């Protein structure tokens, strides 16, 4: 009888804890996704409707400064009438936005491509080589990875100035290529690949190049995709680097240009923000399984 009561209490506690955790998870999810949903739906509003709903939020004085407004802001998730005016303006009538979008692509794509390429080779070396020097070097990689980019911004600026690449895209691309994050992630996964596979390949006469291409790369596919997603998102949202390295604002990516959109064109800001988030969103949805597997996977091969 006593054991039955204890079991019931334990079962009840589990149900209560599950319910509380579910409520917290749903609440956090709603809070997290609300700004994104609001941005997408409001991008289909006409400028007049946006001004009617949010005009008080962006009110300015005659001198151009902000002023306090006691009126309530009307948050609307469903437009009264669908309007594609903002997107037509961004895509066809105002080339500045698309120009800045391609600036983001030109800066981000080479960083992702070449960082993964160099990271794969470096991670393979860390996984295969043995010795104290390798461990010290890997520890240095770890320390550098833990440093925020702001710490290395001034040294990067000085090096770029010495190399005469300041105010060029190379001043951002080169430091981005040699960021150690992808090396660390791939090396941790490659180290878990059983050495017996390497020995079997060597008995069959495989060279290091073949071991790398036919054993290590296929078994770390999930880690590669997850590293690519994380590297892309990190560099797609860059702000400090262009502001410091570029004196010419025409080279700024869209991430910087978003903050400079006139508050009088808040409708355009919604549309540009939606266009800006689309690449990262599609890449995340495409590689979500690989992202989870690459981060949480505890071994190179499922046992």
Image: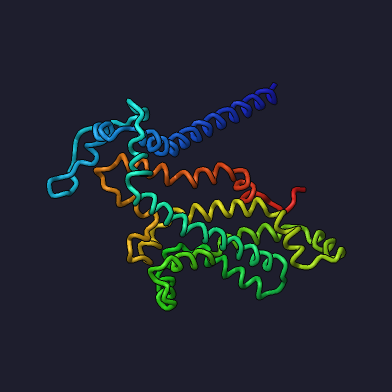
Q: Residue at x 83, y 62 (%)?
A: 201
**Depicted 231 relative to depicted 124: above or below:** above
- Pick the front one: 83 or 182: 83
**Quadrant that contains the N terminus:** top right
Q: Residue at x 64, y 53 (%)?
A: 223
Q: Residue at x 34, y 51 (%)?
A: 96
**Depicted 4 relative to depicted 72: above or below:** above
Q: Does residue 223 appear to the left or right of 97 in the view shown?
A: right
Counting from the top left corner in percent of width and height, residue 13 is at 58, 29
Counting from the top left corner in percent of width and height, residue 5 is at 65, 23
Q: Does residue 210 appear to the left or right of 160 in the view shown?
A: right
Q: Residue at x 37, y 41 (%)?
A: 271
Q: Which of the 4 quarters of the picture holds residue 277?
A: top left
**Depicted 118 relative to depicted 257: above or below:** below
Counting from the top left corner in percent of width and height, residue 204 is at 86, 63
- Pick the front one: 126 or 212: 212
Residue at the far right: name it: 203
Q: Does residue 5 appear to the left or right of 79 in the view shown?
A: right
Residue at the far top: name it: 1
Q: Does residue 84 appear to the left or right of 136 in the view shown?
A: left
Counting from the top left corner in percent of width and height, residue 280 is at 49, 47
Q: Is residue 11 visible?
A: yes
Q: Which of the 4 quarters of the picture holds residue 215?
A: bottom right
Q: Is residue 73 visible?
A: no
Asked which colour scheme the image uses, the reply is: rainbow
Residue at the far left: name it: 62
């Amino acid at each position: 009888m006593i054991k039955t009561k204890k079991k019931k209490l334990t079962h009840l506690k589990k149900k209560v804890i599950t319910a509380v955790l579910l409520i917290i998870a749903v609440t956090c999810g709603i809070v997290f996704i609300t700004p994104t949903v609001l941005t997408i739906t409001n991008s289909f509003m006409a400028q007049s409707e946006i001004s009617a709903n949010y005009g008080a939020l962006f009110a300015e004085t005659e001198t151009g400064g902000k002023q306090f407004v006691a009126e309530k802001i009307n948050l609307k998730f469903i437009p009264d009438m669908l309007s594609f005016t903002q997107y037509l303006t961004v895509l066809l009538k105002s080339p500045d936005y698309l120009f800045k979008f391609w600036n983001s692509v030109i800066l981000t794509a080479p960083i992702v491509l070449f960082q993964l390429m160099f990271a794969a080779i470096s991670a393979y070396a860390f996984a295969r080589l043995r010795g104290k020097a390798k461990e010290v070097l890997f520890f240095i990689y770890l320390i550098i990875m833990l440093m925020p980019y702001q710490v290395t911004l001034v040294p990067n600026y000085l090096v770029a100035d010495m190399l005469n690449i300041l105010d060029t895209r190379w001043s951002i691309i080169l430091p981005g290529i040699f960021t150690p994050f992808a090396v660390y992630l791939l090396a941790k996964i490659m180290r878990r690949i059983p050495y017996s596979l390497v020995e079997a390949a060597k008995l069959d006469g495989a060279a290091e190049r073949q071991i790398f291409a036919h054993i290590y790369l296929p078994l770390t596919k999930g880690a590669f995709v997850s590293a690519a997603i994380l590297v892309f998102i990190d560099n797609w949202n860059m702000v400090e680097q262009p502001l410091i390295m570029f004196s010419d604002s025409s080279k700024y990516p869209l991430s910087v240009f978003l903050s400079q959109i006139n508050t009088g064109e808040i409708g355009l800001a919604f549309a540009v923000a939606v266009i800006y988030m689309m690449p990262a969103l599609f890449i995340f949805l495409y590689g979500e399984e690989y992202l989870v597997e690459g981060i949480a996977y505890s071994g190179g091969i499922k046992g």
